[in-house]
Image (spheres, rainbow, N blue to C red):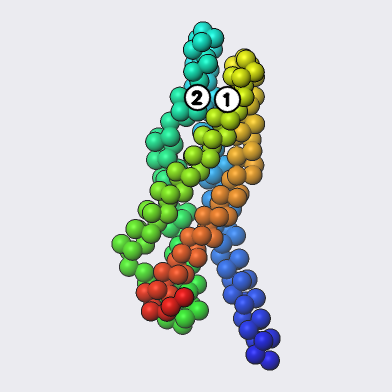
Amino acid sequence: KAIIKSAKRRASKWEMFAAITAPQERLMKGAMERYFAGQHNEVMRNLNNYRSYSKEAKAGISANIIFNMNEQNEKLKIISKNHIREALLSGAGLASSELGIDFNLIEPNVLRAVDARVGFFAVKVNEATAELLADELKEALTNGETIDQIAKRIDKVFDYSEKFRSIRTARTEVIGANNAGQLQVYAEAGIEF
């Protein structure tokens, strides 16, 4: 009987977790799709600036020239901060409910946790995008491709990002922030894990 109760409890906890995180994932996925679409437009505008350059100058195209890492990191931090904050707080709420305590995370602790998570997240997402772009640009330049052919390669990177990376990124960050919120409540309640 104890095993059955434990299995039912785990299933119930999982259903609650999924009910909370699924809508958050959908919202963050939409934000990531819009972010990647905007980033795609910016990269394409920057690439089009190379149309009138000489062949030698075009050889200098790199992910860093058409993709400003610092600007993109700041944009992504702004876009993702509220999504990650909500996920962290909902995780804290789940843990508080599970423990049967009325527990509010102190706002500065939440802000520190969110800022740390968002900063790391933005850098990693944009480093991955820059790497995908750099690989495509390197191959295109090695093959002596035209700007139009390079544009198709860039389209491929962002098509992949908008369709697949957006959901994977949203799921990873929402679940990670939710779990971090739970762990923070456990730690502040003195529960060792």
Query: Based on the displayed image, in which of its 4 quarters is residue 11 positioned?
Result: bottom right
Examine the rendered structure and indicate whether residue 60 appears above or below residue 80. Answer: above
Label 1 crowd (10 A; few <14 / some 14-19 / many >=20): many
**Between discs 1 and 2, the one toward the N terminus:** 2
Q: Amino acid at mark 1?
A: Leu
Q: Is residue 52 left or right of residue 192?
A: right
* Element class at badge 2: loop
Residue 39's spot in the image, x, y percent?
A: 51, 33
Q: Is residue 35 left or right of residue 191?
A: right
- Camera sees residue 153: yes
Residue extending furthest left? 108
Residue 164's spot in the image, x, y percent?
A: 64, 44
How far is mark 1 from mark 2, CA to CA? 7 Å
Residue 77's spot in the image, x, y percent?
A: 42, 45
Q: Quadrant of the N terminus?
A: bottom right
Residue extending furthest front? 142
Residue closer to the observer: 28 or 186:
186
The residue that mark 1 highlights is 137
Label 2 crowd (10 A; few <14 / some 14-19 / many >=20): some
* Residue at point 49%, 18% (across, down): 60
* Element class at badge 1: helix
Q: Amino acid at mark 2?
A: Ser
* Residue at point 47%, 81% (across, down): 99
Q: Is residue 163 left or right of residue 70?
A: right
Examine the rendered structure and indicate whether residue 123 appears above or below residue 135. Answer: below
Examine the rendered structure and indicate whether residue 123 appears above or below residue 71. Answer: below
Badge number at residue 123? none
Evaluate if marks 1 and 2 touch, with contact meaning CB atoms under 8 Å apart.
yes
The residue that mark 2 highlights is 62
